[in-house]
Amino acid sequence: MKTRTLTATFLASLLVMSAFAQAETKEEFDQRMAWFREARFGMFIHWGLYSVPAGEWKGGKVKGLAEWIQSGAQIPVADYTPLKDRFNPVKYDADAWVRLAKDAGMKYIVITSKHHDGFCLWDSKQTDWDIGSTPYKKDLLKPLADACEKHGIKLCFYHSIMDWHHPDWGTKKPWRGNAENPAPDMDRFTAYLKAQLDELLTGYGDIGILWFDGEWEDAWTHERGKDLYAWLRRKNPKLIINNRVDKGRKGMEGMSKDSKYAGDYGTPEQQIPANGLPGFDWESCMTLNGTWGFSKFDEKWKSAGNLLQNLIDIASKGGNYLLIVGPTAEGEIPAASIERLQAIGAWMKTNAESIHGTRASPFPTAPSWGRCTSRKLADGKTRLYLHVFDWPADRLLVVKGLEGKTGSAFLLADPSRKLEVQPHADGLRIQLPATAPDAISSVVVLDQD
Ligand code: FHN
C-alpha cells in the first residue's frame, strides 16, 4: 500500500511540476529574471546568533566559518541555545544598511532569514527559536523591508533548508537538536519549512529571491526540491528561486548538472566561472574577508580594487556579484566592509552604466588589458564598455576581434572628450589620453559603426 501511495504522490508531483514548468514560456521567464539581470550587484547579509561568539568558543578561536561555529565547536543545542539571551542588536540601523548597499551600486539585498542553526530573524508563529526570544524581541526583517521599499532596493531572503535545531531534520549529528529524536519526520519538517516561507513571502512586501542553501544533506531529496519549487512558484509567480532549492548543484562551482533540477539560476560560491555561461543566469557569492558571518579574528580583507575587478569580471561574463557583509551581534557592519563598499560606490558613481543592465562581452576571451561589457542601444547597435585595468604605456588600446572595424569612442569619466579610433588589421585601435581616469578600472565606451 505504502509503495503505491508514494508512487501516486510522486507521479502527481511530477505532473504538477511538468505542468507548472510548461506553464512558463521563455518570454515569461526572461520577464521574471529581468530585474535580476539588470541588477548585476547585490548585498549578501549573514547575521544571527553566531554573530555573538563571532568565531570564539570557551576562550578559543574555532576553526571554520563563523556562522558554522555550532558545528566547528560541536556545540550541543543545550549549550548553543543560551546565545539567544545575548543577541541584542541595539545598534541595528536598517535604513543605514540599505543606503550603504544603494550607494555602493547594489540593487538587491539577500539577508539570512534562517541559517543552518535554525534561528529565525523574525518572530515566527512556527517556533520560539527566533528573535522574539531574545532581549531585543523585535522583528529584524520588517525594518529592512521598509527601508528597501523606501530606497527602491529588492529584498530577498537566504533560507537554509538544513536545520540544526529542528528535531525533525532528518540528517542526524550528535550535537544537533534532532539527535534525541529517534524518528525524525521530514514531511513534518517540510510543512514547517513551508509555513515559515509563507510567513516570509506574505509579511515583508515584494520579495525578489528566495536564496536556498543547505540542500546537500541526504535528508533533502530531489523530489522535495522540485515540490518546494513548484509550490513557491504557485504562491508567487514573480519570485526568483536559486538552484539550491533542489539537489542539482555541482558543488561550489554552483551550476546545475542538468535541467531536470529545479532552480532559476546557478550559484558559484567564492569563485567566478572562467568564461561566460551563455544561456544561463548565475550569481557568484563571495566574502569580503574569509567568512560569511562576523568573525572577530578574520582580518583577511580583500582590497577594494580586487572586489571591484571581481564585479567587472563577473558582469563581463553575464553574471551577478553577491557580496557579503557580516554584521556584529550589536547590529553594526564592520568598518572594513563599509570602507570597501564606499570605494566601490565611488567608482560606480561614474561608471554604473558599464555594469547595470549590461550583457556579457561579445568576445570569446577576455582582453589582456581588462574586461568588456556590452549593451544594445535603442538603434540596435552594440555599445561596448572597455574596462581598462592596465593602461597601455603607448596610449594605444587594441581591441582584438574588431579587426578592420571602426567606430566612435569616449571615456565614460569624460564623455565630452572624443577619442581617436583607427581600424587596423590586428584589431581596432583607440588613442588614449596619457593618464588613466581611474587607478583600478577606466572605462572606454566604444560605439561600433
Ligand atoms: O554553509 C553555508 C555557509 O555558511 C554560507 O552560508 C555559504 C554562503 O552561500 N553557503 C554555505 C556554504 O556553501
Image (cartoon, rainbow, N blue to C red):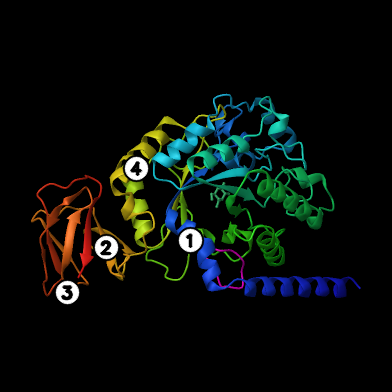
**Please, what is the dominant secondary structure of the magenta stretch?**
loop
Residue depicted at 44% across the width and 53% down the height:
39
* Quadrant that contains the C terminus: bottom left
Identified at 51% across, 37% down, the residue is 326
Q: Which residue is disc 2 drawn over?
A: 384
Outermost residue to the right? 1
Query: How many C-alpha atoms fall within 10 Å of the one at disc 2: few (<14), some, or many (≥20)?
Result: many
Compare marks 4 and 1 and give the one earlier in the sequence: 1
Relative image position of residue 360 (x, y in whole percent): 36, 64
- Amino acid on which disc 3 is placed: Glu
Specify the label residue 105 is tagged with: none
**As drawn, 314 above or below 103:** below
Q: Is residue 380 left or right of residue 102?
A: left
Rendered position, 300 above or below 381: above
Give the alpha-carbon distance from disc 2 to disc 4, as whole Å.
Answer: 21 Å
Query: In the rendered structure, which disc, 3 or 2, sits on the residue that comes first in sequence?
Result: 2
The residues bearing labels 3 and 2 have C-alpha atoms spaced at a distance of 15 Å
The amino acid on which the numbered mark 1 sits, given as a three-letter code, is Ala
In depth, the one of 440 and 105 nearer the eye is 105
Amino acid type shown at disc 4: Ile
Gap between marks 1 and 2, in whole Å? 20 Å
First of labels 2, 4 by sequence position: 4
Residue picked out by circle 3: 403
Question: Mark 1 against mark 3, which lies toward the viewer?
Answer: 1
Residue 256, position in %: x, y? 54, 67
Would you name the residue on which mark 1 appears?
Answer: 34
Q: Which residues are magenta?
A: 255-265
Please name the residue that numbered disc 4 is placed on. Answer: 344
Q: Depth-wise, is mark 4 or mark 1 nearer the camera?
A: 1
Indicate the secondary structure of the residue bearing disc 4.
helix
Give residue 398's position: percent from left, percent from top: 15, 64
Report the side of 176 relative to 90 (left or right).
right
